[in-house]
Every structure is written in C-alpha cells, then in structure tokens.
C-alpha cells in the first residue's frame, strides 16, 4: 500500500490500481506514483489467476471466465474491506472514498467491479479497458 501526505481536513481517497494481464503490480505502481495525487492511499494488488509462464490475470478467458469473474469480484471486495479496515484502525472517525483504475485488463477489472461489485465507488477510470462476458445473475 502506498500513501501520499494526508490532510485530515479533506476527504481521503482509496485508489486501487489494477495491472493488465501479464503485467505486474510494480508496473501499475510506477504509473500510479506519476499521478501525484493528494490525500490518497494507493493499493496495487496482483491478479489472482495464474495464466502460466509467470503471467497473472484477474480472471480466465474461455469456459471458466464466468466463474473466475465472480471470484475476481469477491477478491476485490476483500481488498476494499481490508484497506478500509486498515485506515479505520489508524483514523476511526474518517471514511475513505473508494476509487478504481486500471490499464487493459486492469481497466476491464475496474469496469467489471463497478457493474458487479458490492461497494460504493467514488470514481472509476479505465484506460484501454473492455467488458468481459459477465456471469449470469
């Protein structure tokens, strides 16, 4: 988790950055640090699906896509819950505004969570993202 200097008089944002398929959290961290955001806690998780050859993804393509998209939504909710809990331990009177962004499949991850996720979101950005096939609901 990264964080900028926090001004307690202003709203605090949680920014979760999703890397593209085959990329790494470190790559999206470099881009995230260039944003020069104020009052922001930044989280750069790693995709939980091993697509082989050291390539990590947010979900599988193909016949298991619906199942793994559901798993991604659960995983992301847990990340958001953990980050909010971490901040609550530091500053119990304040709430975080959750924001998502990502590149390529990471952008798709941001859009997918926006549609299927359970948490309220303040802002979402998708750079070169797309929408996967969604699980039947």
Image (cartoon, rainbow, N blue to C red):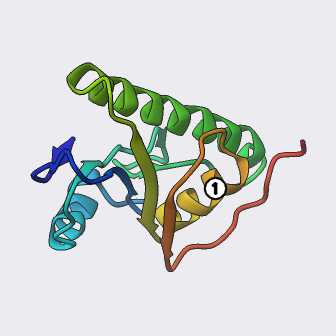
Q: Nearer the viewer, residue 92 or 50?
A: 92
Left or right: residue 40 versus residue 49 is left
Please identify the quadrant where the N terminus is shown. Answer: top left
Q: Nearer the viewer, residue 44 or 11?
A: 11
Q: Look at the picture and state if 44 lies above or below 19.
A: above
Binning the other alpha carbons within 10 Å of mark 1 as few (below 14), some (14 to 19) or many (20 upward) gives some
Q: State the SS at label 1.
A: helix
Residue 54 placement (x, y as % from top left): 34, 48
- Residue drawn at x 39%, y 59% as measured from the top left: 22
- Residue drawn at x 31%, y 23% as measured from the top left: 92
Q: Look at the picture and state if 21 lies above or below 68.
A: below
Q: Look at the picture and state if 19 lies above or below 60.
A: below
Q: Nearer the viewer, residue 14 or 69?
A: 14
Q: Residue furthest left?
A: 5
Residue 132 placement (x, y as % from top left): 71, 62
Q: Residue under label 1, please give it.
A: 114
Q: Residue furthest top?
A: 89
Residue 106 placement (x, y as % from top left): 47, 61
Toward which corner of the image does residue 70 lie, by quadrant? top right
């Amino acid at each position: 988790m990264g964080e900028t200097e926090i001004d307690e008089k202003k709203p605090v944002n949680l920014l979760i950055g999703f890397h593209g398929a085959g990329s790494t959290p470190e790559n999206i961290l470099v881009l995230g640090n260039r944003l020069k955001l104020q009052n922001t806690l930044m989280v750069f998780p790693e995709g939980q699906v091993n697509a082989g050859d050291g390539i990590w993804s947010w979900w599988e393509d193909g016949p298991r896509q619906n199942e793994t998209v559901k798993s991604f939504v659960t995983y992301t909710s847990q990340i958001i819950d953990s980050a909010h809990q971490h901040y609550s331990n530091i500053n119990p009177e304040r709430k975080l505004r959750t924001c998502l962004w990502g590149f390529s499949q990471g952008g798709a991850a941001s859009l997918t969570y926006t549609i299927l996720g359970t948490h309220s979101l303040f802002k979402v950005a998708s750079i070169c993202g797309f929408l996967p096939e969604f699980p039947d609901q």
